Amino acid sequence: MLDALLGRASLKERIDELEEENERLRNRYEAESERRSEAATARQDAEERVNRLEDRIAQLEGELEQLEGDEAGLSVRRRDRLRGSRLEAVVDRLTSFRTDPEGALTAILREDEGSETLAEAFDVDLETPLGDRAALVDEAAPCVLCLDDAGLIAAALEPPAMPDRALADDSRIAWDDRFRLEREWFLPTGRYALALVRTDLFALGTYADGDRVDYRGFESDVKGNHSKGGFSQARFERIRDDQIDDHLERCREALAERVGDDIDRLYLVGQRGVVETLAEDASLEPAGTAAVDATGDPKSALEDAHRSFWTAEFRAF
């Protein structure tokens, strides 16, 4: 009765309502925090599964190639996709090899080059150390071939950043007492930038020895592959092309703004046609390009693209 007369009853009711609302918000916050934690854990688990599946796929591809080679009577001794510490260990072993003067061949083979190219253009006979297995080199190009004259080492690596295609022939084929391999062909060294470009997404990372130190990314509103809402196909395609052009212009501006003299090298990855168009229109000279299938938001897609790019195909003959 007294509370009602003093107006405290309504205040107490309001306090009870606010406390209930506060409790609901606290429960919602705790549920959201738990959901975010579970999402982060799920993402880490998914990344681990992806890595395991990629390794398994590479293993199965190697086994398939071996089976196919067995049918033809030839097969590589080993085939694998290497990255990170595994790739670094292989490169270190190859570069530490020493032999007699002109006993180690390093050959940078472009696409569609192989044993015949080496024999006819450079007078390099692969049949002496490799025998019939010399034919397997043709399937490995483009690659960097490492072979000693005794046939003890016969391996090919397709590096993430193939050496400059403008290299003179006498620089592509070299006999020495060691294999001439540059670490920057295979491993993330120095200060470089890697840009992921799709028709609707752009992500640019600046790295120092493989560690990202700067980032810029965005997504653009680009229509899908099929028209909706009554658009004619021609009109739909014109609108989509204009949206893609606007997106690529944003990409060019971001590259011009972020990639400066402090960057040693630029790598472009993503959708093949988009990468080629951007490199040409922006007058870029990337140190390497690659088609990668990286999905998700810009930052996570960039992480996937960076890991995928710095992966090398390895074959032992």
Image: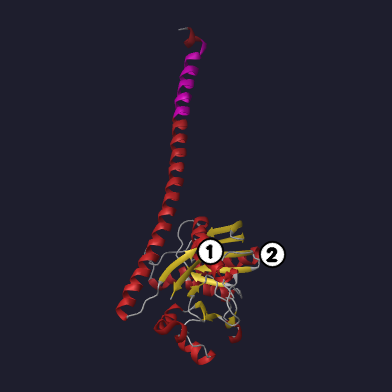
For the residue marked with disc 2, what is the amino acid?
A: Asp
Name the image colouring: secondary structure
Locate residue 181 relative to residue 69 in the image: left or right.
right
Quick one: quadrant of the N terminus? Answer: top left
Tell me the quarter of the image containing the C terminus. bottom left
Residue 228 can be seen, yes or no = no
On the image, the x and y values in percent for residue 41 come to 44, 45
Mark closest to the chain's N terminus, 2 or 1: 1
Q: Nearer the viewer, residue 115 or 277?
A: 115
CA–CA distance in space, label 2 to label 1: 29 Å
Which residues are drawn in magenta? 6-23
Left or right of 97? Residue 43 is left
Secondary structure, magenta segment, majority class: helix
Residue 79 figure quarter: bottom left
Membership of 273 in magenta stretch: no
Was residue 18 drawn as part of the magenta stretch in this picture? yes
In front of the other: 129 or 66:
129
The residue sitting at 57% across, 61% down in the picture is 204
Q: Position of residue 246 (x, y in %)?
A: 54, 67
Towards the viewer: 26 or 95: 95
